[in-house]
Amino acid sequence: MNKKNDFVTKEIFIPYENDFIPKKQFIAYLDILGYEQLIKEDGGAIKIAKKIDANIKGIILSQSIFGEKEMKFNIKVFSDNFIICSETRGDIVFILANILQINLATDGIFINGSICYGTLLFNDNFICGQGIIDAYKIQSEIAIFPRIIVDDSFILKARNTWQGKIKRDFDGYAFVDYLRTIMGLEMEVIEFLSIHSYQIDMNIMFHALNPRVLQKYQWCKNYHNEFCKQYGYENYIIE
């Protein structure tokens, strides 16, 4: 055999044109606060990845329970960001973002982000489109604190799926009222408030010398205490 003429052929995947058509979708864009500091801890990045993985597996399990057709959505995680999207189920995108926020908070991992409606191309290799640009802009410029901003584009398109689950903040922006939504979950409210207050306290003490980060957890403290006062959980107010 002539070695000079030997060569290996490889199949090259060329996406169909239809795979590159952006579509109108409900979009959640989430970001982990203080990720850079968290991964500096011993095994921090791996610990966070495992927690995120466990949450996603739980989400996928819930999808199989309700049926794939009924729960059609896409989710992708890269570094400290999550993207959840669906062409038809704004309620599912809202619920999944809410669940992630609640579950991660119990581990002391707070997130912020945005939920909106816009044009998005989402496939195995690419995520792009005006929708993700809008979602990122809301997350980075408006969310600021550990809150998920719910944009008017979502509120108008998703109709009543958000009723009773959002709240207007001091600056007029609507955000996911995740403390109120735990009242409808299996988790004990008192158990969650106890954990929530502890994690906020720990973050306030840890970031005491960093005013920029400290203000984010001060917002959490105010949000937590306001909820406790409103619904009669005064024993769990953070001093």
Image: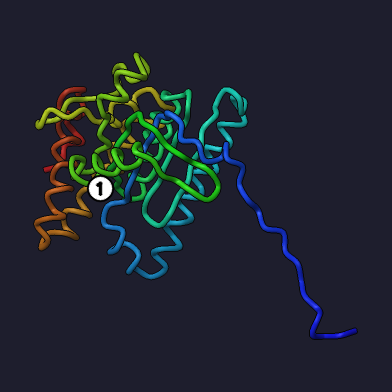
Residue tagged 1 = 198
Q: Position of residue 180 (x, y in %)?
A: 28, 26
User: In the drawing, does residue 91 fall left or right of residue 238?
Assistant: right
Q: Residue furthest right?
A: 1
Three-letter code for the amino acid on which mark 1 is drawn? Tyr
Residue at horizontal 37 percent and vertical 50 percent from the top: 81
Of residues 68 and 64, the one nearer the viewer is 68
Residue at horizontal 57 percent and vertical 22 percent from the top: 70
- In terms of secondary structure, where does tag 1 sit? helix
User: In the drawing, does residue 19 fall left or right of residue 145?
Assistant: right
Residue at horizontal 40 percent and vertical 40 percent from the top: 100
Q: Position of residue 143 (x, y in %)?
A: 21, 40
Mark 1 crowdedness (10 Å alpha carbons): few <14, some 14-19, many ≥20: some
Name the quadrant of the N terminus. Answer: bottom right
Of residues 5 and 221, the one nearer the viewer is 5
Residue at horizontal 55 percent and vertical 47 percent from the top: 124
| Quadrant of residue 191 within the rendered picture | top left
